[in-house]
Amino acid sequence: MWRLSMQEKQHIAVIGAGIIGLCNSKSLTDAGFSVTLFDEHGIAEKCSKGNAGHFATEQVFPLAQASLLPKLPSMLLNPKGALIIDWLYLFKALPWFTRFLINMSKSKFSAHIKALRQLNEASLPAYKNLLGAENFKKLIHVDGSLLTFEHEDFKLAASMAESFRSNGVAVEHLKGEEVFLLEPSLTKNIKQALYFTEVGHSVDPYDLCQAIYKMSEAQGLVFKKDKVARIVPNNNGVMIELVSGSKHQFAKVVVSTGAWSKPLARQLGFKVPIDTERGYHAMVDNSTCLKRPVASADRQFIITPMKQGLRLAGTVEFAGLEAAENMTRATMLLDHAKSLVNGIEKQTVKTTWMGHRPSLPDSLPVLNTAPNNKNIVFAFGHQHLGLTQAAITAQIVSQLCLGEETSIDLTPYRIDRF
């Protein structure tokens, strides 16, 4: 109780109301801090609103891997492929891709696997701790996920399964009818699959965000819909200056602004090579045909059963924060889905969406205090794993704000690693 009463006297600002910022706010209010959350768009109105809903704890391999190199030309030349670059944006993206290539070295690849593993392995337990057992069961379904293959190269899939197992991921290699016993609605185009048995999903990521916000609000969280213009460290902690003109003093500030983090980091003296991987989704009817997320290794997208229907999500598009949406990137996913799932042959796309994934070239987030100021905490850049890693990130953020030893080594995620 002594620690709780002391923390109530400290005011902390959390900037960014996506899933990372919301979990940070919940964890900090749980710890007894007085928290004010800032976001110019509202609660979970950007990337966290329309993600695939997949708690991808199996994704322990960084995107920067040498095996990707021979595939890149065909991927980039295929307008319906998993990866495209807006050629008008290519010059701006070149420094990011140069760093991405550098991170493919064997030593960096191994180090980044270790860094991703320590976050992913703690992710679902951290959510259970953050939400409580009853809310966890209600909001997160742990039914596993499938990675499907439309070929019969069983040795290749078995080798992939062994790579996952050797890195601590629970996986089973299913062949033929074993796949359909688990998911009867899948088409016979699928010849085999990897079944990740300990993976979870949300039937509505936006609802999950809103639920976390309401829990925090009930504990005293204050939300201000405004844009932070400046963060000014001072002798009393940190001053927040808003675009609206008001100024607010806090003991500490947590920067969780996703793909929009670069200007605030630069203002505080850190040059962070963050870019945005624009991701899309399309919604179709028939949410009952699948029990769990089904990803395609061949087509590089994922289908997640949600309360509104099936969410078809994926693809990567480099075009920056300002370019117009290219919704053919979303609608094309239906053709892929029709090849994998029976019963949606006559479906049409109900709605589409685009969001900005905050991506760093080593596939690791920025997660630590500023090296020159312990009152500033950074928690952004989670790439494809923001939903997955939000609760463990929040646990670490609270430990940093409490001045406690963190539960994992934060060296790989330092903001000054670049």
Image: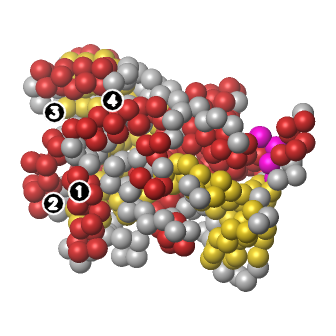
Nearer the observer, disc 4 or disc 1?
1
Percent of width and height locating residue 267? 54, 73
Residue kind at label 3, given as amino acid type: Glu
Residue kind at label 1, given as amino acid type: Leu
In the picture, the quarter occupied by the C terminus is bottom left
Percent of width and height locating residue 362? 34, 49
The residue furthest bottom is 245
Of the two numbered discs 1 and 2 on the same chain, state the one appearing first in sequence: 2
Q: Secondary structure at mark 4?
A: strand
Mark pair 1, 2: CA separation: 6 Å
Near mark 2 (Cα within 10 A), the count class, few <14, some 14-19 or many ≥20, is some
Mark pair 3, 2: CA separation: 22 Å
Of the two numbered discs 3 and 2 on the same chain, state the one appearing first in sequence: 2
Nearer the observer, disc 3 or disc 2?
2
Q: How many marks?
A: 4
Mark pair 3, 1: CA separation: 20 Å
Which one is nearer the viewer's eye here, 307 or 276?
Answer: 276
By what rule are the colours in the image chosen?
Answer: secondary structure
Q: Secondary structure at mark 1?
A: strand
Of the two numbered discs 4 and 1 on the same chain, state the one appearing first in sequence: 1
Residue identified by numbered label 3: 150
Residue identified by numbered label 1: 83
Which one is nearer the viewer's eye here, 305 or 418?
Answer: 418
Q: Secondary structure at mark 3?
A: loop
Near mark 4 (Cα within 10 A), the count class, few <14, some 14-19 or many ≥20, is many
Residue 358 makes an appearance in the image:
yes
Q: Secondary structure at mark 2?
A: helix
The numbered mark at residue 402 is none
* Span of residues in magenta: 30-34
Residue identified by numbered label 4: 146
Which one is nearer the viewer's eye here, 152 or 171?
Answer: 171
- Could you tell me which residue is drawn at 21 percent across and 38 percent down? 106
